[in-house]
């Protein structure tokens, strides 16, 4: 019976080393691609919150009273301050995962999460005596307007304020999630090619 054999001396070890090196490089490239995509996504979300239209869905505008209760000059965009708490969290190994939102740990993160949840679902609150006095005082500070005693008037029968839902995460993800995998793949290819992303 005839048999044929082939002797491989150094080739297998060299190939194994090359495969391991490629795997290490590709794992690192993928991890970087995911983190860069997450970072850019957070930047976009912060920008769109400050503009008052995450995912191109405009927030319900602030009421006349809410706008004038602000002592600092404001652009009149609701929830601008929530952009300050937006962060991202990434699982750096497969299966990769990106979490974007109010993910910071501790009291600060909990504060932003609580406010964000409340604002995104909408709420109604009673007008306390202290708030009523503050509103009246602020109206007096602003002085008189043409045709009215003060810039705004709060009826005694008005006992509650309703704040409408202002969705943030849902419209944002609806618009950008479909493109995220493509963006990660593009960043991965660029990183594997030795380019900056």
Image: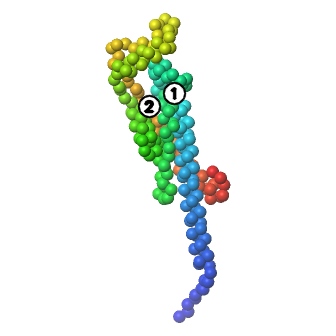
Residue plotted at (38% across, 18% down): 132
Task: Tell me what residue is drawn at x 49 percent, y 40 percent.
Answer: 86
Q: SS class of the residue under badge 2?
A: loop
Q: Earlier in the sequence, mark 2 or mark 1?
A: 1
Q: Is residue 97 above or below residue 12?
A: above
Looking at the picture, how far across and down is residue 53, in whole percent? 52, 32
Count of labels in the image:
2
- The residue mark sitting in front, 2 or 1, is 1
139 relative position to 32: left or right: left
Give the answer, above or below, for where 80 lies relative to 148.
Answer: below
At numbered mark 1, what does the secondary structure look like: helix, strand or loop?
loop
Q: Is residue 24 positioned above or below 2 on the image?
A: above
From what the image shows, is residue 176 above or below residue 53? below
Residue 105 position, x and y percent, is: 44, 46
Q: Which residue is mark 1?
A: 77
Figure quadrant of residue 111: top left
Q: Residue at x 59, y 66 (%)?
A: 22
Q: Is residue 182 visible?
A: no
Residue 40 shows in this picture: yes
- Disc assigned to residue 87: none
Task: Tell me residue 171's x, y (percent).
Answer: 47, 37
Q: Which mark is residue 166?
A: 2
Residue at image point 63% right, 54% down: 190
Pick the front one: 44 or 8: 44
């Amino acid at each position: 019976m005839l048999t044929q054999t082939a002797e491989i001396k150094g080739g297998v070890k060299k190939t194994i080393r090359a495969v391991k090196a490629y795997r290490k490089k590709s794992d690192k490239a993928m991890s970087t691609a995911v983190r860069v995509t997450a970072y850019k996504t957070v930047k976009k979300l912060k920008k769109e919150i400050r503009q008052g239209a995450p995912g191109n869905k405009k927030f319900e505008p602030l009421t006349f009273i809410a706008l004038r209760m602000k002592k600092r000059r404001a652009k009149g965009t609701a929830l601008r301050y929530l952009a300050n708490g937006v962060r991202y969290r990434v699982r750096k190994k497969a299966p990769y995962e990106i979490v974007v939102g109010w993910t910071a740990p501790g009291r600060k993160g909990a504060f932003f999460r609580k406010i964000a949840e409340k604002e995104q679902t909408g709420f109604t609150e009673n007008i306390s005596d202290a708030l009523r006095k503050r509103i009246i005082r602020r109206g007096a500070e602003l002085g008189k307007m043409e045709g009215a005693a003060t810039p705004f008037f709060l009826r005694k029968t008005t006992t509650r304020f309703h704040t409408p839902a202002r969705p943030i995460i849902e419209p944002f993800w609806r618009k950008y999630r479909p493109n995220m995998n493509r963006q990660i793949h593009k960043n991965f290819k660029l990183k594997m090619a030795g380019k900056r992303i």
